[in-house]
Image (spheres, rainbow, N blue to C red):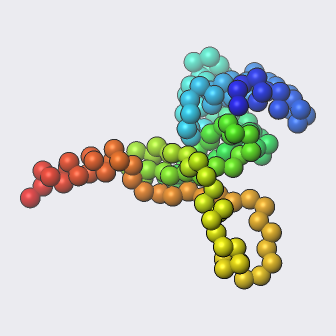
Amino acid sequence: MDKTKLLKELRNKGYKVTPQRQEIIEVLTEREGHQSAEEVHKRICSHYPAMGLDTVYRNLALLRNLNIVSEINFGGKNRYELNRDGDGHSHHLICLGCGVSQKLDFCPLDYFDWNKVLKKDFKVKNHRFEIFGYCSHCIQIEENEGEGEE
């Protein structure tokens, strides 16, 4: 989803399009993948040095609640990404070494046998699915470091 559509969606949901929100959405549209609030803040400070980190956090929380951004917790830090497909439904492989995340192009829950998983009536409203491991780059670094030991 492009910046113009995101700003229009924000207006349609009854929220003002403030310069701060515009800048946060701009930063998130410039780069794919998850960014921490601190990373977003750092990139905004060059244009808006007076914008505080708390403003970034409040606006990211609003955008998350409006399903404009998704949030994952990695390494004790929340990270945010635009919901480019519009539904906020995505799942990721997350590298424990470098922190890079890779979006899965399917929902693993589509393959669940819900009759086996749930023992009683239960209506799923939302879910998150992240798999933590190591990317090929970090595996290669670890293997190369291991060759020098003995």
Considering every residue shown, the one lying at the far top of the view is: 47
Q: Residue at x 33, y 44 (%)?
A: 137
In terms of depth relative to the viewer, which is nearer, 123 or 39? 123
Q: Quadrant of residue 124?
A: bottom right
Considering every residue shown, the one lying at the far bottom of the view is: 119
The location of residue 49, given as percent across then percent down, is 62, 20
The location of residue 88, given as percent across then percent down, is 71, 46
Q: Is residue 96 left or right of residue 8?
A: left
Q: Residue at x 44, y 50 (%)?
A: 95
The location of residue 143, given as percent across then percent down, is 23, 52
Q: Is residue 58 shown to the viewer in this render?
A: no
**Quarter of the image where the C terminus is located:** bottom left
Q: Residue at x 72, y 83 (%)?
A: 119
In terms of depth relative to the viewer, which is nearer, 33 or 86? 86
The location of residue 112, given as percent across then percent down, is 64, 69
Q: Is residue 120 shown to the viewer in this render?
A: yes
Considering every residue shown, the one lying at the far left of the view is: 150
Image mark count: 0
In terms of depth relative to the viewer, which is nearer, 46 or 121? 121
Q: Is residue 120 left or right of residue 16?
A: left
**Quarter of the image where the N terminus is located:** top right
Q: Is residue 111 above or below residue 6?
A: below
Q: Is residue 137 left or right of residue 71?
A: left
